[in-house]
Amino acid sequence: MTECKEQHNPEECTKMIVPVRDALEILNGKWKLPIILSLTFGAKRFKQISKDINGITDRMLSKELKDLEVNQLIKRTVHDTFPPTVEYTITEHGKSLEKMITELRNWGLEHRKQIMGK
Amino acid sequence: MTECKEQHNPEECTKMIVPVRDALEILNGKWKLPIILSLTFGAKRFKQISKDINGITDRMLSKELKDLEVNQLIKRTVHDTFPPTVEYTITEHGKSLEKMITELRNWGLEHRKQIMGK
DNA sequence: AGTAGTACTATCTTAAATGATAGTGCTATA
DNA sequence: TATAGCACTATCATTTAAGATAGTACTACT
């Protein structure tokens, strides 16, 4: 793998950055990662997710769920009970975010220590 | 570690989510992670960073660098040459993001395959 | 009969992020 | 002499994200 060290190779460095920008574009905003994390603990219904995530409004949750579905990170299933119930599950592709979210979570914990602790 | 599985324990689940929200608050926006990634390849000057990151404006770069400095993720050093040159380096604390960014980057690559490939 | 829950949508407003453009005072280079 | 680079800042305009509030049609519970 080529580098973009000290004496800088901007083009190489740009290439390294592009996929993180791609990822950020899909995961942007305050709520998407929290929602995904909530679903990694099992299938949930709309209200259950909203209870997990403090402060999210129905409007935001509804919108973000749609976005995540379009990007194949979660799946929406309507059960034909009466009244119908709707269940959200994480997809295999969504699960592939788990490791990264764990890292982020641990970093969040460490960061608090770093800032407070010193 | 307690769980918030199927039959849901919202309080526990909320607790899991909080630190990822903390992290997101510090790393939010389009540019912070790209900037940090750029600096993991070595100390850089303002213009060099801006060349690495396609599309960022001076205004945004300037602002984001300040934010990152406040959060102790990068360090700004002025060398007293004439004219003075300014150098940005990643801090130890900033380096602790490296693993997580790598995960994100790989995920970005995989996601592209997932969406395009199928 | 009244309240609460379910899974949303609609409308409106505010706040925050980002972008466009230009300018500064200096130096080095063509 | 003109141009470009450096490390920014200032001003303004636009876009996007997010929040507030209310409403729907239905059921279950008290």
Image (cartoon, coloured by chain):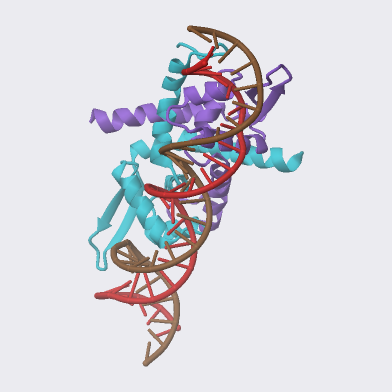
Chain colours: A cyan, B purple, C brown, D red
Residue B112 x/y as whole percent: 32, 29
Q: Residue A28: which quarter of the image? A: top left
The quarter of the image holding the C terminus of chain A is top right
- Could you tell me which residue is drawn at 46 percent across and 50 percent down? B5
Asked if residue B60 is positioned above or below residue D5 in the image, the reply reads below
- In percent of width and height, residue B114 lies at 29, 31
Residue B91 visible in this rendered orientation of the protein: no
In the displayed structure image, the side of residue A11 where residue A83 appears, left or right: left
Depth order, front residue of A42/A9 = A9
A32, B68: nearer the viewer: B68
**Location of residue B79 with respect to B65 vertically, above or below:** above
Which quadrant is home to the N terminus of chain A? top left
Q: Nearer the viewer, residue C4 or B40?
A: B40
Pinpoint residue A103: horizontal percent, then vertical percent: 54, 34
Q: Nearer the viewer, residue B16 or A108?
A: A108
Can residue B6 be seen in this snapshot?
Answer: yes
- Residue appearing at x 55%, y 28% in the figure: B36
Q: Quick check: C17 above or below B101?
A: below
Q: Looking at the image, which residue is at 23% across and 31% down?
A: B118
Residue placed at 31% from the left, 58% from the top? A86
The percent coordinates of residue A21 (x first, y second) are: 42, 32
Number of numbered discs visible in the structure rendering: 0
